[in-house]
Image (spheres, rainbow, N blue to C red):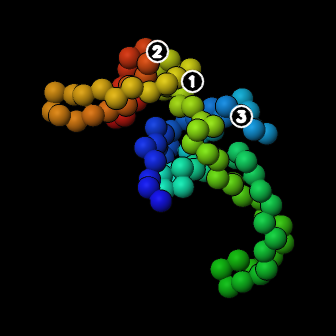
Amino acid sequence: MEALKVHIKKNDSVLVLSGKDRGKRGRVLAVSPKKGTALVERLNLIKRHTRPNPRQKQGGIIEKEGPLSVSKLMLICPRCDRPTRIRRQGLENDKRVRACRACGETVDK
């Protein structure tokens, strides 16, 4: 399976476009380009029934984030604080960065 070109990165602020968490915002915890998914903080929570083990003394039902498809996520521009599409912009040192379509500000530091 070939890795997808992903428009979001870890620690980006995103908006969920569809599904049970539609309209909610969150911070990206991890991105998996091979699967085309991302984990978003406190969104798409799933319940996991776990047994006690040496690392986790207490067993029971644990809530954790489930993967969301990156096609359901839209980046929120840090400058204009609105959901926006991304464009790739070349800098003078031949480096390509992500830029906001609305305000033109670069998203990458």
Residue reaching furthest bottom? 54
Query: SS class of the residue under badge 2?
Result: loop
Count of labels shown?
Answer: 3
Query: Which amino acid does the dot numbered 3 rest on?
Result: Ser
Element on which disc 3 rests: loop
| Residue 46 % position (x, y) | 77, 56
Q: CA distance from mark 1 to mark 3?
A: 14 Å
Q: In the rendering, at what x and y percent does residue 105 appear?
A: 38, 20
Q: Earlier in the sequence, mark 1 or mark 3?
A: 3
The residue carrying mark 1 is 83
Q: Which residue is mark 3?
A: 18
Could you give the CA–CA distance between mark 2 and mark 3, rounded to whole angstroms? 22 Å
Cα gap from disc 2 to disc 1, whole angstroms: 9 Å
Name which of mark 2 and mark 1 comes first in the sequence.
1
The local secondary structure at tag 1 comes to loop
Mark 3 surroundings: few (<14), some (14-19) or many (≥20) residues within 10 A: few
Residue carrying label 2? 102
User: Which mark is in front, 1 or 3?
Assistant: 3
Q: Quadrant of the C terminus?
A: top left
